[in-house]
Image (cartoon, helix red, strand yellow):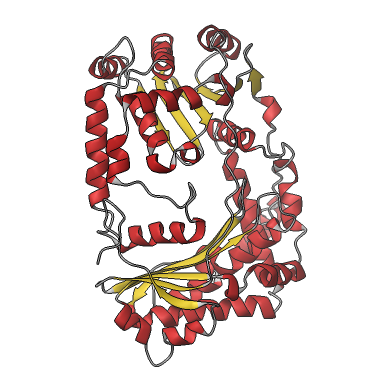
Amino acid sequence: MITELLLLGVLGIPSHPNDIQFSEYTFVPPTSSEYRHELSNGIPVYIVEDKELPLIDVSFTFRGGAYLDPKDGVGLSSMMATLVRDGGTTTLSAKELDEQFEFLAASASVNGNRKSVRAALNSLSSNFGESFPLFVEMIKNPGFQESRIKLNIDGIIEGLKQRNDHPSGILRRETASLLYGDSYMGRSTTMNMVESVTKNDMEAMHARIVNPSNLIVAISGDFDKDELLLVLEDQLGGWSVGEKVPTPPNVESRFMPGIYYVDQDVSQGGVRIVLRSLRRDDDDLEAATIMNYILGGGGFSSRITQSVRSDEGLAYSAGSYLRPGVYMDGLWGAGYESKSKTVALAAQLIFDEINKIKEELISEDDLNLAKGALVEQFPSLFQSKSQTIGVFVADEMSGRDPRYWSTYKNRIESVTKEDVMRVANELLDPNKMAMIVVGDWDEISVGNERASTADLGKVIGGSITELPLRDPLTLVPID
């Protein structure tokens, strides 16, 4: 054995895995200028060749989404996006369009969200010359076939009927309504809104959103870049530029702090503890990110998860999140589901951890663990070529500073323990929080011998307010 160890030493091979020395990994993020091009009509295009598979992935992202929906037409932009794909074109029926994509072994989809409409095409490179013009035709000239509109409306209404079937759905709806009020962030659609949508409504919304002034294109896959640019110019360069939609509006917080509950006869209570927080360009964002990672965002290593789940066994999943806002104040929140008798106790443990991170400096080990995790996760944003250009599309769409990624690591590593404590005290004010609960209130309010809802009322500012359960189709309170 001694001879073998001596031989390993001579060869420079460590005698034990703990003795292995790894050189520092240095990741230099790519820059958007490496991939960005522009067509003659101003459409920005991000292109990256990837010949690993004989496939081409295309993404059209249009600025404009639910924030453009009228108050009495919530869901219109999303329905329009769905019917761009499902409703045929002005020259092809919906069935014919489906059959052509199927024949070409190509997959096309269109969907809408709060801030954008995204269309995607996945095609064999050998069929791209046929599938891409078909995709562009679908995007430019949707048919909005009446029979497919009716089918889509019927499907949405069936989904609305089930909105109260799961407490988590009620929790999401009421949290959004409480935080964002009568804004596009807080509104929900109703059966009457869905049934009132017409083909003309969809055509008008399509004309407003789906035009070159709102578009960013991303393409990755098996092609020659110069040849692809010629194809894009041929297919898109002559597309007349329309009106550019405004960016999403600022939505201010108007909720009153306190405890809000929806009484439901279920065995577990679902909970969200929330407050409005930082914007993406805030100088304290990195410190807040590290603070939240340690508090509840870092998975099993985070304090809330350890306290509520690992130590007490009160919830299968418990943690916190930080979502910085781009056009408005962001959101910090904590959430969990627990048995009715222990809902209050789990909340009390979360507030104990909040107080701790505000009153005691975190350890050097905690700080280094959080920094290390965030820095090590950072390269995964760019782990594939399609992901890389997807990052840059999102950045251009939201107006992020192009230098952001090149300075990310340094900003994370510059955060101190004192920064974490200061940000925790500035951000995590219980008197500005709302706690929303869905569950059996009679049991939840009593709690157990260790904590009750009355105890939480002393921690969170405001009063305890019942929110009525709302009819799933009309959203009118149920008596």
Q: Is residue 286 above or below residue 40?
A: below
Q: Residue 104: x percent and y percent? A: 32, 15
Res 317 visible: yes
For residue 157, side relative to residue 296 (left or right): left
For residue 297, side relative to residue 72 (left or right): right
Q: Residue 58: x percent and y percent? A: 48, 23
Instruction: Give whichever of 440, 95 is nearer the camera.
Output: 440
Instruction: Give whichever of 73, 45 is nearer the camera.
Output: 73
- For image coordinates 30% across by 23% down, the residue present is 87
- For image coordinates 65% across by 53% down, the residue present is 279
Instruction: Give whichever of 244, 222 is nearer the camera.
Output: 244
Q: Residue 296: x percent and y percent? A: 54, 67
Q: Is residue 393 above or below residue 379?
A: above
Q: Quadrant of residue 106?
A: top left
Instruction: Give whichever of 408, 479 is nearer the camera.
Output: 479
Q: Residue 319: x percent and y percent? A: 49, 67
Quadrant in the picture for the N terminus: bottom right
- For image coordinates 24% across by 53% down, the residue present is 162
Q: Quadrant of residue 403?
A: top right
- For image coordinates 50% across by 9% down, the residue present is 235
For residue 337, side relative to residue 362 (left or right): left
The residue furthest bottom is 449
Quadrant in the picture for the C terminus: bottom left
Q: Is residue 397 above or below residue 457?
A: above
Count of all numbered marks drawn on residues in the image: 0
Q: Is residue 370 above or below residue 220?
A: below
Q: Quadrant of residue 153?
A: top left
